[in-house]
Every structure is written in structure tokens, then in C-alpha cells.
């Protein structure tokens, strides 16, 4: 890379212009990263959905309940390894703005079906023994400054009254993009105290022996309860999350369009800058050729400058974006998944390079084709 | 005396490639900005127009929406004699309603969406005078009949006039289409509340909410005071408009914040592009600038001249951006409102104010991108520039 | 009358006394002009010659208000320009100086007419009055039929003629020419010099010209050489400068 000093020196010729072009790249790639993050947030966890889990909901709609009695019947189906259930509580903590998801869970099976949520053994045991106990995700705990042992009052909305819970444990996630906002408490507690809906749960989550069992177990469950008062609709967790995400309208279309607009513009800006820079240096490039550097060399020189700008700008933009996401969800609750995955960063760098090459190719070939005689005469 | 404008116009034309680059950069930014804000505005407008000034919504105290609370029948009966409620002859204009969700496939993706189904009273059209039947007829009380909002047939599959659908464990027939003036109701299915309760196996005497038509907008406080001081009642009373404003806030704020953030970032990029263009222009034209200064045009004339060019480019960019997104106006799309957990069809709403803001944004970018190069143009030592080859 | 000894009376149009100009370059001080004197009467055509780096351009810049001296005074038509602020200097320049450069320096996106009109935009003349002045100026340089051409459509010689027209259109106190024939072939150069000569003889214009070209210097009434920071008169003082 003995020509690197030459490339760098040329870029330093007009420092402001180089800085502005790098800035354009950085901005565009920061935006790219942000759009990936937002798209991920709206997908509401499609990526974290387990491949070996099925969700069983009431066929009418997800807010209709299912009988607790179904549990044992489903467990007997071959292919089913374990089963647990959730019920949406939807209470209010101090203010409606302080939204976080609250579920009444089946404590005996919750961890079997959701092994990815890490809770220290002693905390879990304490939770099991306390009827009014609760386990909360580290995200929500941090948000409100809750510690183990705190007594949390929640005002019921669906199930009226003042409900109070003792925090017995705080769960962490295994990966960056796990949902750390959930609040779990004992189903028994809910079912005892509530005035209606007794004996009913929200939906079941079934853990399969292997992902291959998905199709036949899904069919078996729905057939079992067809034509009953509570018909079921069973889907893989991924499919359910994906359907849910699709209700958010053409978010993906919006994101793709914005992305396209940004990159098209970026391409123009950089290409134009490169072209101007080359135009200004025709004299020098001609001299280089006269001295004995090949046409190909001159082309690679110009291309090299373009790529260097792209690389620096791209890394800068993506880096800043990653830092931004480390701060967590800026809307406090609406976007539990606010995270820039490494594959996206790699994709971003590839795109930056591609744009760098595309933008530089025309001026570079122009520089390559430059005839020394013409160029020197122009000077 | 100023440098003639024809100089700027011709100079821009001579360097048209750079100018177009800057124009497109600004156009793209303004377009995205206006599009996202109009999305938020359309969403909000659809929801807010659902409520009227002279209707009150009564729900269980503590409920955050309509679905997560219940008002029992005996409390609904108290309303019959409450003050401030308009009457049609002897009948108080009250509509106790049962609100549930049913899954229907979206026409756009084929996957299910949570559609809001509202069991209403037979007097609902009198309680909500802004809603009119458009096609077909009103449902027959006691029967499994549906009337659908004007956006329903186009958004969800299988809900055209005359269709039969199965949901909730029962078979229903779509007998009419109503027009609710572009509000959230246009995405809803309405039917008899008693029938809905039965089909959904809900206790007969529980309602999700009760909507009443007031004698006048001012009557709200009378009604509210009366109900909240009544020991038999455990309800909250809101003006319908205020309720819809509240439940629109979540998504509206999110889209607005997101849209502004994206536009701001793009704006920075566009400004960089504009700066690059203008600095290059100054650089290429340094001899002309010096000549004009030698002739006697002052530094101010130069600054204003270049600033004018930058603003011209920005203005054209802003105009193109606005024109490019205009076709979106009125385009319906759909999204799910977290706050009600139901899907809603709404349209992009581009207002003249929004377009004005877009153009101002463009001019701001032009200013930021034009001032530093203009100052540099005016500052260069004349003698030096004249001898530059 | 032209004098370089500082002894001229108060009647001269241009009067320079004790002009010093020092540059700093890379830590070193370079004294370009040292105690230079000059008197030029109205209507004189003066040529300045000297080797490269002798300070001809510096003198030019100082005289036309584009630069400020380290010491000394410059009085033009009674105005002491060395003490003028930037804005005043610009105004003064617009009124008193007409420039003709070696590289013509026409604005490529304006027509010949518009280029010539440029200095008039700084005056309060109406559009029709400006048109009259431009047409007159263009007639003097013999390009009345090319007013709507762009610089790229003109030859080098024609471009320089447009530049001259621009320089005289506002009727400035004196013309400042910096190597006006430097970029031209012999024939075009002669055309230009003919015009300058006419301007001097027929229109009694005061012309100061920096040049390398001996044929150009011949047209002037007096030739001054810049040597060691001061001006000296006569041909003999610069040995072997031309044949």
C-alpha cells in the first residue's frame, strides 16, 4: 500500500470537501442503520421467536380466552414436550404512560418453554413460593428503579381493583435483542381474585420436541377443538409475530422507499464530488501519466480515494448508530426491540463500498482515458 | 447595485449537474419529511374525527380503552335519567356498546388483522348523527346482521355488501355500508350489541362503553358531575373528541418523532451536498468573483448573489419534493393502533400548512448550505484570485 | 508629464510618494517596493517594464486599490487612497479605475453586451442610458456587431476588445492594463495596441500599462523600468531589454 500516502494527500488537498463528503456517507449510513432498527422494532420480535414453539389462541381473536382445561389435552399430543400459558393483565402503574406488558403466567412451566430468559435459581424459587410474587425484566426494573423486595401497586384495568405484587426476581436476556420489559406474576393469584373469567386463560405456548413436529402438532390441536365453544388457531410463534407485524401496514415499504431515496441521493452527491475533484486535477493526472504511471494506475488512484471516503464515512455512520441504540428504546415502551444487529452493520459497510465504487467509476474511467496531450494543452 | 440575477441563473445552468444533485438532495429530504408528517396527520385526523363535541363516552373507571373495562347494565340504566342527555321524544339518546376484536384477513397481505367489531344499540345513528347509511340497510335488531364502515370492504377480505362471514362462532350477513366521514368507525363492523354478546358468550349485562348524545357541548360538565358523585356509578366520563384524541396520541407521536428525526438526518446530508456544490461553485468561479470585485462590486453584493443561488436551488428542490409526494394525499393505508389493539384504515393527509413547512425546511437547508460558501466567496483576496490560473 | 523623482507639482493626476511594500514569505521579509515615487499627468500613456518578480504587479495592485502599501502615499485625482477603508476603496475603484487583464477575465455565462454593462450597474444610470454607453464603448473597440455573443464564441483578440470596452464604458479616471497583449498572437496584439493608442491620442485617456512586450511599450509616451524597488526612466537604464 505504498500509494496510500498519495491517496490520502489528495484527499487532504481540499479538507473541507473531503470532510463534507465523508459526512454525507456517515449521515446516509446512520440513517440506514436507524431504518433497520426501526424495522426490527416494528417486527416485534419475529427474529427472537422460537422455531420450536407454537402459540395456541382463540380462533375468534387473540383477546378471547381459552379454557384452562385444554392444557392436559394438548399435553397428550405426540410431539409436545411442554406447555405453558399467559394471560394479559393490562394494568396501569401510576400513569398510563408508564406502559409495560404484564402477564399472569404458569410458573411451573414458564422457564421450560422460555429457556432464554435467565433468572437466578434462588430468585425463581422465591417467586414460586410467593403467591403475590412477580418477576420483572431488567429493562422495566431499571426504568422505574425497582429492586428485589419492592412492593409494586398496579391498578387493574380489565380486572378492576388495586393489585399489589412483590418483586422476587429480575430476568436478563441472553442476546441483545431479547425483550426485557415483561412483568410476570402468578396465574393463581389472578384467578382467585378476579370477578369473571375464572378458569380461562389467554393463550397457550407449546414447546415441541423438535421444529419438525410443528406442522402435525398444529393440525392436531386445531382439529381437537374444532366446533367446540372455544375453537383454537395454532401457529408457530414466528408466524404469529409476523402476522402481528404485518398489521403495522406498509412499514417495510416505507422504510425501503426512504432508504432508496437516501442512497440514490448519496450516489449523486458523491459521484458529483468525485467528478469535480478529478476535473480540477486534470493537469496533475496528466503529469503523472507523462512521468510514466499507467492509465490503470490513475484509475485505481481515483477509485481508491472514493473507496476510502466511503469506508471512513460508512464506519462512522454505522458506529454512531450502534452507539445510539445502546441507549435503549427512546420511546420507553413502544419499541421494546431497539437494536442494530451485526449482520446489518456488515450489510451497511458492503453498501457503502458499493456506492463508493459506483460513484467513483465514472470519474475514474475518465481519468484513465485522459490523453496526456489534451490535458497538458488545456493547462 | 446588485449583481444581475441573470448571472446567477446562467451560472446555475452552466453547472447544471451539480445544481441538480443539490436540488434532488433537498427534494428527497423534503419529500420524506412531508410524507411522514402527513401520515401522522392522517392517522390523527381519522381518529379525532370519530369523536364529536356533543357526545360523551362513558367507560369503567380505570379502563384505558374500550375493550379493557366493563359497565354493567344497572349502571347503564342510571343514565336513562341523567342530566344533559339529549332526547328523541321520550327516548334518551344512549347507545350502550360492546366492543370486541375479530380477526379478518387483510386484502394487502392476506394475513389477519384485528378488526374492531362494535355491538351497538338500534338508536346508534341518532346518537351519532354524523354517521349515515350509504348502501344497503341498517341491521335488523336480534339478527346476525352486520353493517360495515366505508373503508372495510377495501381493506379486509370477504366483507362486501351481501357477503356472509363466519366469526365469533356465528354466521353473519353484511346487509349495509355506512359512511362515518372518514373516521375510525369507517374501519369497523357494527351489529346488534345483544346478538354480539351472545355469540361471543359474554355475560348479557355487561357493556364495554356507553356513548350518549348531549343536549349541548356544555352539558358535559353537568353530566360528568352527576355521574361521578353518584355512589352507584364507577365510571369515567369523557368528551368523545377528547377520548379519540388521547388514543391517537401514541402512534401519532411515534410517527411524527420518527419522521422528524429521519428528515433531520436527511437534512444534514442534504446540507452537506449543498455545501459541497456551492463551495465547488465558488472555487470554479473565483476568477469571475475577483473580476467583479475589481470592477467595484462590494463584498455584500457577492454574498447576496451566492446566497440567492443557494436559496433558488433549495426552493426548487423543496417544490419538487412537495410535488412528488402530493399523489400520496388521500392514499389509504392501514396500521394497528396499540392503544386500542385494533387495525385502522386511514389516509395520508397533506395540508397546505404541511407543504409550507416543507418549503421552509428547504429554504433553511439552502441558507445553511449557502451562507458559508458565500462568505468565503466574498472574503478571498482579490489580487490573488485575479492571477490564478 | 511623467516623473519618478518625487519632484512633481500638485497638478498631476496620479501622485505617489515614498511607496514601500514588504511581503512576508516563509519567515523571510521581501521588500518589493522601496521608496517608490511617481507623477503622472492626465492623458499620459505610460508603460511599466521590468523582469519577473520586480514588483510590477504589486505596483499595479497598489495603484488600483486592490492592495495596501506598507508605507507611503498614493493620491489619485486628489483622493488619498492609502487611508481608505475597504468599502470606500471599492466604491473609489468602481469610479476611477478601468481594468484590462492578460486573461481577459470575462464572465463566461454573460454575453459581450452584459459583460460590458457590468460596471454600469454600479451607477445610477437607467437601462436605456446604460445601453447607450455600452453601444458607444463597443463601437470604439469595433465590435458593435458581436454584442450578443458569448465569450466562448469570440476569438482571443475579440475577447480582449470586449474587456477594453468594459474598462472604458464607465469613463474611469485611468485605465490599468496588466500585460494586455500577453496571451495574443501578433496580429491581435497589434489590434489591441491600436485601440489603446487611439484611446490615448483621440480620447485623451490616461493609461498605465504593465508589459513584457517591447512593441507594446513603444506605443506608450513614456516607459518606466522597475528596478530594485523603484522606478527609473528611459531606455538606457535597462540594458539589453529590447532591440
Image (cartoon, coloured by chain):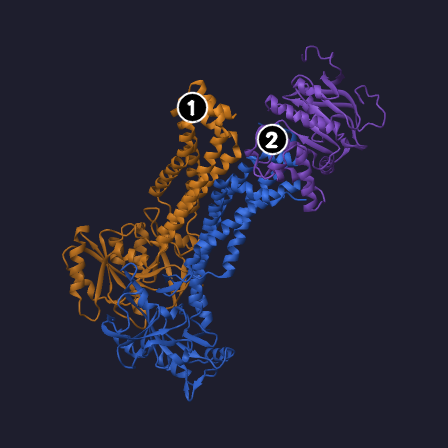
Chain colours: A orange, B blue, C purple
Specify whether residue A331 is in view: no
Above-or-below relation of A10 to B220? above
| Chain of the residue where label 1 is placed in the rendered structure | A
Q: What residue appears at the point 22 percent right and 52 percent down from the top-left corner?
A: A52
Residue sitting nearer the eye, A204 or A311: A311
Which residue is labeled 1 in the image?
A: A3
In percent of width and height, residue C115 lies at: 62, 38
Question: Does residue A124 appear to the left or right of B237 in the view shown?
Answer: left
At 70% across and 20% down in the image, what residue appears?
C217
| Disc 2: which residue | C158
- Residue C183 x/y as whole percent: 60, 24
Image x and y of residue B114, in percent? 31, 65
Quick check: B209 above or below A43? below
| Quadrant assignment for the N terminus of chain B | top right
Q: Residue furthest top?
A: C239
Front position in the image: A203 or A171:
A203
- Check disc 1 and report its element: helix, strand or loop: loop
Q: Is residue A41 above or below residue C136?
A: below
Left or right of B5, for residue A138: left
Callout in the foreground (2, 1): 2
Question: Which mark, residue B1?
Answer: none
Label 2 is found on which chain of the structure?
C
Amino acid at each position: 500500500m505504498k500509494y496510500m500516502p498519495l491517496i490520502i494527500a489528495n484527499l487532504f488537498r481540499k479538507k473541507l470537501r473531503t470532510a463534507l463528503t465523508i459526512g454525507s456517507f456517515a449521515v446516509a449510513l446512520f440513517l440506514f442503520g436507524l431504518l433497520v432498527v426501526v424495522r426490527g422494532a416494528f417486527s416485534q420480535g419475529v427474529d427472537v421467536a422460537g422455531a420450536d414453539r407454537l402459540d395456541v389462541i382463540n380462533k375468534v381473536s387473540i383477546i378471547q380466552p381459552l379454557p384452562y382445561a385444554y392444557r392436559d389435552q394438548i399435553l397428550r399430543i405426540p410431539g409436545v414436550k411442554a406447555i405453558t400459558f399467559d394471560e394479559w393483565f393490562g394494568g396501569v402503574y401510576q400513569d398510563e404512560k408508564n406502559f409495560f406488558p404484564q402477564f399472569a403466567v404458569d410458573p411451573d412451566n414458564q422457564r421450560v418453554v422460555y429457556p432464554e430468559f435467565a433468572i437466578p435459581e434462588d430468585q425463581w424459587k422465591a417467586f414460586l413460593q410467593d403467591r403475590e410474587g412477580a418477576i420483572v425484566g431488567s429493562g422495566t426494573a431499571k426504568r422505574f428503579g425497582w429492586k428485589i423486595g419492592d412492593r409494586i401497586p398496579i391498578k387493574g384495568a380489565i380486572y378492576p381493583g388495586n393489585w399489589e405484587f412483590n418483586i422476587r426476581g429480575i430476568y436478563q436476556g441472553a442476546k441483545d435483542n431479547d425483550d426485557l420489559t415483561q412483568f410476570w406474576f402468578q396465574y393463581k393469584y389472578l384467578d382467585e381474585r378476579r370477578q369473571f373469567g375464572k378458569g380461562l386463560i389467554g393463550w397457550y405456548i407449546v414447546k415441541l420436541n423438535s421444529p419438525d413436529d410443528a406442522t402435525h402438532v398444529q393440525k392436531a390441536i386445531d382439529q381437537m377443538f374444532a366446533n367446540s365453544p372455544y375453537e383454537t388457531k395454532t401457529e408457530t410463534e414466528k408466524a404469529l409475530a409476523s402476522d402481528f407485524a404485518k398489521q403495522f401496514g406498509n412499514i417495510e415499504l416505507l422504510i425501503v422507499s426512504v432508504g432508496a431515496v437516501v442512497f440514490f441521493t448519496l450516489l449523486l452527491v458523491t459521484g458529483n464530488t468525485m467528478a469535480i475533484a478529478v476535473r480540477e486535477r486534470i493537469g496533475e493526472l496528466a503529469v503523472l501519466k507523462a512521468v510514466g504511471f499507467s492509465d490503470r494506475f490513475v484509475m485505481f488512484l481515483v477509485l481508491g480515494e472514493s473507496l476510502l471516503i466511503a469506508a471512513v464515512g460508512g464506519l462512522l455512520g454505522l458506529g454512531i448508530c450502534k452507539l445510539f441504540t445502546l441507549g435503549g428504546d427512546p420511546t420507553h415502551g413502544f419499541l421494546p426491540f431497539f437494536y442494530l444487529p451485526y449482520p446489518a452493520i456488515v450489510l451497511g459497510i458492503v453498501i457503502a463500498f458499493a456506492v463508493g465504487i459506483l460513484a467513483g467509476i465514472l470519474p475514474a474511467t475518465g481519468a484513465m482515458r485522459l490523453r496526456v496531450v489534451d490535458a497538458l494543452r488545456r493547462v | 447595485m446588485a449583481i444581475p440575477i441573470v448571472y446567477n441563473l446562467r451560472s446555475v445552468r452552466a453547472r447544471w449537474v451539480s445544481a441538480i444533485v443539490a436540488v434532488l438532495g433537498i427534494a428527497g429530504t423534503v419529500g420524506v419529511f412531508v410524507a411522514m408528517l402527513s401520515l401522522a396527520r392522517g392517522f390523527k385526523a381519522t381518529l379525532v374525527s370519530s369523536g364529536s363535541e356533543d357526545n360523551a363516552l362513558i367507560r369503567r373507571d380505570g379502563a384505558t380503552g374500550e375493550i379493557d373495562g366493563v359497565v354493567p347494565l344497572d349502571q347503564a340504566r342510571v343514565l336513562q335519567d341523567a342530566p344533559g342527555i339529549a332526547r328523541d321524544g321520550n327516548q334518551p339518546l344512549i347507545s350502550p356498546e360492546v366492543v370486541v376484536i375479530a380477526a379478518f384477513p387483510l386484502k394487502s397481505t392476506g394475513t389477519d388483522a384485528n378488526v374492531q367489531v362494535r355491538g351497538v344499540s338500534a338508536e346508534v345513528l341518532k346518537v351519532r348523527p354524523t354517521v349515515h347509511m350509504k348502501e344497503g340497510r341498517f341491521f335488523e335488531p336480534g339478527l346476525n346482521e352486520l353493517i360495515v364502515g366505508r373503508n372495510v370492504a377495501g381493506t379486509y377480505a370477504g366483507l362486501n355488501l351481501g357477503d356472509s362471514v363466519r366469526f365469533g362462532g356465528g354466521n353473519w350477513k353484511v346487509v349495509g355500508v355506512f359512511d362515518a366521514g372518514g373516521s375510525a368507525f369507517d374501519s369497523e363492523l357494527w351489529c346488534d350489541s345483544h346478538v354480539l354478546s351472545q355469540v361471543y358468550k359474554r355475560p348479557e349485562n355487561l357493556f364495554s362503553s356507553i356513548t350518549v348524545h348531549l343536549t349541548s357541548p356544555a352539558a358535559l360538565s353537568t353530566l360528568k358531575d352527576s355521574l361521578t358523585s353518584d355512589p352507584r356509578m364507577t365510571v369515567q366520563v369523557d368528551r368523545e373528541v377528547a377520548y379519540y384524541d388521547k388514543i391517537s396520541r401514541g402512534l401519532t407521536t411515534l410517527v411524527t418523532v420518527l419522521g422528524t428525526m429521519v428528515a433531520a438526518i436527511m437534512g444534514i446530508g442534504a446540507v452537506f451536498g449543498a455545501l459541497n456544490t456551492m463551495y465547488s461553485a465558488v472555487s470554479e468561479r473565483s476568477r469571475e468573483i475577483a473580476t467583479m470585485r475589481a470592477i467595484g462590486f462590494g463584498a455584500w453584493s457577492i454574498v447576496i448573489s451566492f446566497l440567492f443561488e443557494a436559496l433558488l436551488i433549495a426552493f426548487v428542490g423543496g417544490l419538487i419534493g412537495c410535488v412528488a409526494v402530493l399523489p400520496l394525499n388521500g392514499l389509504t393505508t392501514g396500521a394497528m393502533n396499540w392503544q386500542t389493539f385494533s387495525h385502522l384504515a386511514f389516509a395520508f393527509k397533506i395540508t397546505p400548512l404541511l407543504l409550507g413547512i416543507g418549503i421552509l425546511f428547504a429554504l433553511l437547508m439552502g441558507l445553511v448550505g449557502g451562507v458559508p460558501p458565500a462568505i468565503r466567496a466574498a472574503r478571498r483576496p482579490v489580487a490573488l484570485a485575479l492571477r490564478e490560473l | 508629464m511623467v516623473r519618478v523623482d518625487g519632484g512633481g507639482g500638485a497638478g498631476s493626476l496620479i501622485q505617489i510618494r515614498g511607496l514601500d511594500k514588504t511581503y512576508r514569505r516563509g519567515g523571510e521579509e521581501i521588500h518589493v517596493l522601496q521608496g517608490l515615487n511617481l507623477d503622472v499627468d492626465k492623458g499620459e500613456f505610460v508603460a511599466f517594464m521590468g523582469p519577473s518578480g520586480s514588483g510590477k504587479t504589486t505596483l499595479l495592485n497598489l495603484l488600483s486599490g486592490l492592495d495596501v502599501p506598507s508605507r507611503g502615499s498614493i493620491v489619485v485625482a486628489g483622493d488619498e487612497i492609502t487611508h481608505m477603508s475597504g468599502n470606500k476603496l471599492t466604491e473609489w475603484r468602481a469610479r476611477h479605475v478601468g481594468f484590462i487583464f492578460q486573461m481577459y477575465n470575462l464572465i463566461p455565462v454573460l454575453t459581450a453586451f452584459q459583460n460590458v454593462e457590468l460596471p454600469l450597474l454600479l451607477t445610477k444610470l437607467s437601462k436605456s442610458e446604460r445601453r447607450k454607453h455600452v453601444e458607444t464603448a463597443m463601437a470604439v473597440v469595433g465590435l458593435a456587431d458581436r454584442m450578443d455573443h458569448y465569450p466562448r464564441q469570440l476569438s482571443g483578440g475579440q475577447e480582449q476588445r470586449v474587456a477594453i470596452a468594459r474598462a472604458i464604458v464607465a469613463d474611469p479616471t485611468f485605465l490599468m492594463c496588466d500585460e494586455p497583449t500577453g496571451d495574443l498572437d501578433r496580429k491581435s496584439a497589434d489590434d489591441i495596441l491600436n485601440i489603446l493608442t487611439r484611446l490615448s491620442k483621440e480620447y485623451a485617456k490616461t493609461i498605465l500599462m504593465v508589459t513584457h512586450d517591447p512593441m507594446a511599450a513603444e506605443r506608450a509616451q513614456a516607459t518606466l523600468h522597475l528596478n530594485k524597488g523603484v522606478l527609473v526612466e528611459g531606455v538606457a537604464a535597462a540594458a539589453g531589454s529590447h532591440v
